Image (tube, rainbow, N blue to C red):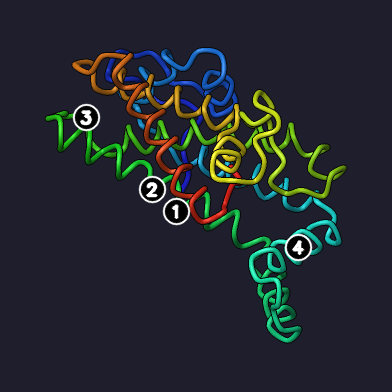
C-alpha cells in the first residue's frame, strides 16, 4: 500500500504536501499541516517514518549497552532473581529488541488515535472520521522519534536507555520515588507531541477550542505517565 506524493486537497485543486514537507510542518507549522490532513488524511508514510526513526535509534545503540541496561532493570525489579530466569529474560530481550519499536510504535499510533476518536468524534459529536485522527497521530509521533535521535548520544554515553530531556532536569534531587519517576517519564518531546495533538484535534474538530483540546491531550499524556510511574516504568 503506497501513498502518492501529492493529492488534491478537498477538491480545491491545491496539491497536498509530500512526506518530507509534512514531516517538517509537524514541527514548524502544525496547524497548516492538520488542516491539510483533515482534507487528505495520509498516514502510512508518516507512521512508517516514525517507526523507521525509532528502529534506527535501537540499531545505533551498542548491543552491550542495551543488554547491560536490560540486565540492570531486571535485577532492580527482582534483586534475588535466579540466574536461569535472568538468562531467559536476556534471551527474550535480544529477540524483542528490534521487534518492540516496530510493534510498539504501530500499536501506540492506533491506540492513541482510537482513544482520541472515541472522545472527540463519538463523545463530542464530531464528524471528521477516524482517518484524519490517525493521520495526525502518525505525524505527531515523528516528534518523540526525532527526540530519541537527539538524545541518542546521551543514551550511549550514560548507558541509560531511559535518558531523555525530561522534567526531572528542572527539579533535581527528586530521587527515585513516585514523583521522581513521574517527572523522569515526562520529557520535552513527549509533551511537545501532546500539545501538537491538541492542535490537531482543534483543527479536525473546529467546534472544540484549541485550549481545551490541548489541555485534554496533555492531561492524557500526564495520566499515562502517572500510571507508568506507579509500575516503576519511567521511560518516555
Return the mark for residue 125.
none
What residue lies at 56% left-to-right and 54% top-to-bottom? Answer: 232
Label 4 sits on residue: 72
Secondary structure of the residue carrying numbered label 3: loop
Mark 1–mark 4 CB contact (< 8 Å): no
Mark 4–mark 2 CB contact (< 8 Å): no
Closer to us: 65 or 17? 65
Q: Earlier in the sequence, mark 4 or mark 2?
A: 4
Q: CA distance from mark 1 to mark 4?
A: 27 Å
Is 30 drawn above or below residue 142 in the view shown? above
Q: Earlier in the sequence, mark 1 or mark 4?
A: 4
Front tag of 1 and 4? 4
Label 1 sits on residue: 107
Is 131 drawn above or below residue 74 in the view shown? above
Closer to us: 132 or 92? 92
Return the mark for residue 110.
2
- Residue 152's quadrant in the figure? top right
Secondary structure of the residue carrying numbered label 1: helix
Secondary structure of the residue carrying numbered label 2: helix
What residue lies at 77% left-to-right and 48% top-to-bottom? Answer: 160
Mark 2–mark 1 CB contact (< 8 Å): yes
Label 3 sits on residue: 128
Front tag of 4 and 3? 4
Amino acid at each position: 500500500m503506497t501513498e502518492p506524493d501529492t493529492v488534491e486537497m478537498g477538491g480545491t485543486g491545491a496539491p497536498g504536501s509530500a512526506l518530507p514537507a509534512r514531516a517538517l510542518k509537524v514541527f514548524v507549522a502544525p496547524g497548516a499541516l492538520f488542516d491539510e490532513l483533515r482534507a487528505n488524511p495520509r498516514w502510512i508514510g508518516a507512521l512508517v517514518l516514525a517507526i523507521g526513526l525509532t528502529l534506527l535509534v535501537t540499531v545505533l545503540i551498542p548491543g552491550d549497552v542495551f543488554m547491560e541496561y536490560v540486565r540492570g532493570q531486571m535485577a532492580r525489579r527482582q534483586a534475588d532473581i535466579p540466574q536461569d530466569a535472568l538468562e531467559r529474560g536476556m534471551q527474550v530481550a535480544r529477540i524483542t529488541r528490534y521487534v518492540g519499536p516496530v510493534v510498539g510504535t504501530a500499536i501506540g499510533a492506533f491506540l492513541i488515535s482510537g482513544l482520541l476518536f472515541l472522545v472527540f468524534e463519538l463523545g463530542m459529536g464530531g464528524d471528521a472520521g477516524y482517518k484524519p485522527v490517525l493521520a495526525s497521530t502518525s505525524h505527531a509521533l515523528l516528534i518523540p522519534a526525532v527526540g530519541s535521535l537527539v538524545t541518542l548520544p546521551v543514551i550511549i554515553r550514560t548507558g541509560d536507555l531511559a535518558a531523555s530531556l525530561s522534567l526531572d532536569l528542572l527539579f533535581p534531587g527528586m530521587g527515585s520515588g513516585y514523583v521522581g519517576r513521574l517527572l523522569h517519564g515526562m520529557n520535552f518531546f513527549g509533551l511537545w507531541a501532546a500539545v501538537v495533538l491538541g492542535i490537531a484535534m482543534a483543527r479536525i474538530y473546529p467546534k472544540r477550542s484549541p485550549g481545551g483540546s490541548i489541555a485534554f491531550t496533555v492531561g492524557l499524556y500526564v495520566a499515562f505517565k502517572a500510571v507508568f510511574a506507579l509500575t516503576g516504568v519511567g521511560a518516555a
